[in-house]
């Protein structure tokens, strides 16, 4: 049984869309959410080290535009490649999964897992 409120909030309850279209729309939304999480984590970790985007690009051996696109997905419009993600993680000295873990501030306020991550 689907959680109807979650299904509706995701914009997937439109009666006009086929199941396949709804699935594709949901995947696009989840990819976008993941890009936003990555952007927030990159920015937080980079700024925590007092680095600018150029500093991160040099340490990660990537073009500065890749850092900018990763931190501003609404401007770049493309997803980050896995090898670039690995380079970012290596430069920041964190595991790759840390870059993809939603910080508690990005989680829904009623999500109980947010409190366990913060501890």
Image (tube, rainbow, N blue to C red):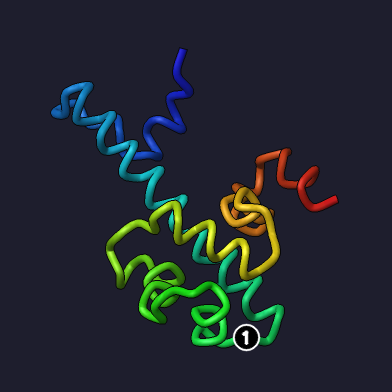
Asked whether residue 33 is in view, the answer is: yes
Q: Residue 23, how many percent across, how many down?
A: 28, 29
| 19 sits to left or right of 51 | left
The residue sitting at 31% across, 44% down in the picture is 28
Could you say whether the residue bearing mark 1 is in a helix, strand or loop?
Answer: loop
| 114 sits to left or right of 6 | right
Q: Residue 57, how many percent across, how many down?
A: 49, 79
Q: Residue 93, how many percent across, how many down?
A: 70, 65
Q: Quadrant of residue 67?
A: bottom left
Furthest-left residue in this view:
16
107 vs 77, nearest the viewer: 77
The residue sitting at 65% across, 69% down in the picture is 92
Furthest-right residue in this view:
119
Asked whether residue 37 is in view, the answer is: no
The residue sitting at 53% across, 63% down in the picture is 87
Query: What residue is pinned by disc 1?
Result: 51
The residue sitting at 16% across, 23% down in the picture is 18
40 vs 12, nearest the viewer: 40
| 69 sits to left or right of 38 | left
63 vs 100, nearest the viewer: 63
78 vs 92, nearest the viewer: 92
Is residue 24 placed above or below 38 in the rendered structure? above
């Amino acid at each position: 049984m689907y959680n109807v409120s979650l299904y509706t909030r995701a914009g997937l309850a439109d009666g006009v869309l086929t199941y396949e279209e709804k699935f594709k729309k949901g995947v696009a939304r989840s990819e976008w959410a993941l890009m936003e999480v990555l952007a927030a984590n990159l920015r937080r970790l980079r700024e925590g080290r007092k680095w600018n985007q150029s500093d991160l690009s040099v340490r990660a051996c990537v073009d500065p535009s890749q850092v900018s696109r990763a931190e501003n997905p609404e401007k770049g419009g493309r997803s980050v490649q896995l090898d670039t993600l690995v380079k970012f993680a290596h430069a920041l000295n964190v595991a790759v999964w840390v870059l993809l873990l939603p910080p508690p501030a990005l989680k829904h306020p009623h999500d109980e897992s947010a409190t366990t991550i913060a501890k």
